[in-house]
Image (cartoon, rainbow, N blue to C red):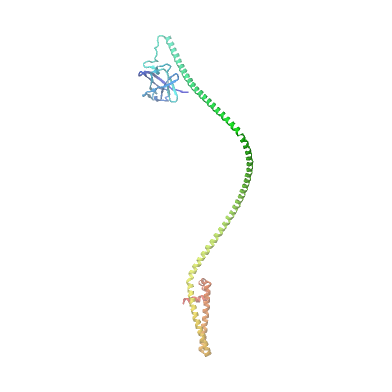
Amino acid sequence: MPAKLEIEINVFEIVKATESTTLLRLSGRWNDRVASDPAELSLVAVRRGRRTPLEQLPGASSSPASGSFAAAYAAPVDLISGRRLRFLLEAPGSRRLKLPDPTERGSARPAAAAPDRTDTAGEALREELRRLAVERGDQLDRFDSVQADRNELDRELAEVRSAAIENHRTHERANRALAEELERAKAQIEALTPVAESRDLVVRKAERRLVLLRARVEEERSARIQAEEAARRGVSELTTEVGAATAHAGRESDRNADLRRQLDQKSAEVMDLRGGAARYEPLVAGLRSALDHVGRELTGLERDAATARDIAADLARGEGDSPSLVAFREEVARQAAGLLELERDALYLHELMQSRELETIGAAGRTAPARRWRRFLST
C-alpha cells in the first residue's frame, strides 16, 4: 500500500500560459525531510482511473534549511477544464499525497461563485453542498477507478476465455490425434499378434539358452575364483622366497664385504712385499754378480786342479816322496779344500736365491756364510 507523503501544501494554483497550455504552480514545505529535491516530485492528473503524468518545468527550487520548495508543471487546457479531475503528488518510495483542487491565480478559493457572507444559513448550505460535491466527486473517482479495474478484469477474463477456448480446441485436436494413434496401434497389435506368438517361442528358447549361459558363467566364475586363489598363494610363496633370497643376498653381501676387506688387506701386504723386494733388488743383483764370479773362480780352480792332478800323476810316476812333491801335494790339498769350500758356498748361495730368503739374510746377517759372502762382496 502506498505510504503518505508528509508535505504541507501552501500554494496550488492554475496559471493560464497559452491558449492550449496551463501552468500548475505548487509550493509547500517538507514535514519529514525525507526528500529535499523537488525534481523528484511527480504531479499526476487522474480522471476516471486514468493517470496522466504532467511534465515538470525547469527551475524547481528548494531550501534545505527551511524545508520549503516550489515547482511548476505544464498541462493541456482540455485536461484541466474537464470534470472529475483530481491531482496526486508522488515521490520515490511509493509515497503519495492527494492534493486539493487548484485555485485560480489571484483567488484564495477554487474557481467558483463567491458566497454571500451575509447569509449565514446559505453559506452553511453551500458549504454542505460543496462537501457533498467533493464526496460525490470522490465517489465518482472511486467508481471510475473500480470501473477501470472492472474493465481491466473483463479484458483479462476475455483473454483467459480465449486462451481456454484455444486450449480446449488444442486438447480436442490432441485427443482426436491420440484416438487415431490408438486405432493405428490397435491395428498394429492385431497384425503383430501372430508374430508375437512366434516371438514367445523364440523368447522361451532364449530363456533356456540364457539359463545355460548363466550356468556356464557361474562355472567360469568359480574357475576364475580358484585361479585367483592359486595366484594369491603363488604370490605369497613367491613373496616368501623373495624375502629369503633378499636375506641370503644380504648375508652374501656381508660376506663379499668381508672378502673385499681381506682382499684389500692382502693387496696391502703384496704392496708391502713388493716394496721390500724393491729394497733388496740391489742385494740380489750383487749376489748374482758374486755367483757369476764364484762360477768363474770354480771353473779356473777346476782347471788348476786338473792340471795339478796331472802334474801329481807325472811326479808320482817319477820321484815318489821327494820334498818338492810333498810340498806340491800340500798345496794341491789346500787348493782342493778351498775349492770344496767355494763349491759349498756357491751351492748355498744358489739354494738361498731359489728359496727367496734374501730378506731373512739381510735382516739377520748372523750366519757365517752370509758374513763371509758380505766380506767377499765388499772386496
Looking at this view, is 257 or 313 the one in front?
Answer: 313
Q: Position of residue 150 (x, y in %)?
A: 49, 20
* Residue at image coords 52%, 79%: 343
Q: Is any atom of residue 375 visible in this view?
A: no
Query: As drawn, is 100 to the left or to the right of 319?
Result: left
Looking at this view, is 85 or 114 the one in front?
Answer: 85
In the displayed structure, 304 sits above or below 360; it is below
In the displayed structure, 193 sits above or below 156; it is below
* Residue at image coords 49%, 78%: 295
Query: As drawn, is 198 to the left or to the right of 313?
Result: right
Looking at this view, is 196 or 353 the one in front?
Answer: 196
Q: Position of residue 237 (x, y in %)?
A: 61, 52
Query: As drawn, is 58 to the left or to the right of 167?
Result: left
Q: Position of residue 54 (x, y in %)?
A: 40, 22
Count of picture labels: 0
* Residue at image coords 60%, 33%: 191
Query: As drawn, is 77 to the left or to the right of 358?
Result: left
Q: Is any atom of residue 299 visible in this view?
A: yes
Looking at this view, is 284 or 72 the one in front?
Answer: 72
Q: Position of residue 37 (x, y in %)?
A: 39, 25
Name the quadrant containing residue 208.
Answer: top right
Name the quadrant containing residue 31.
Answer: top left
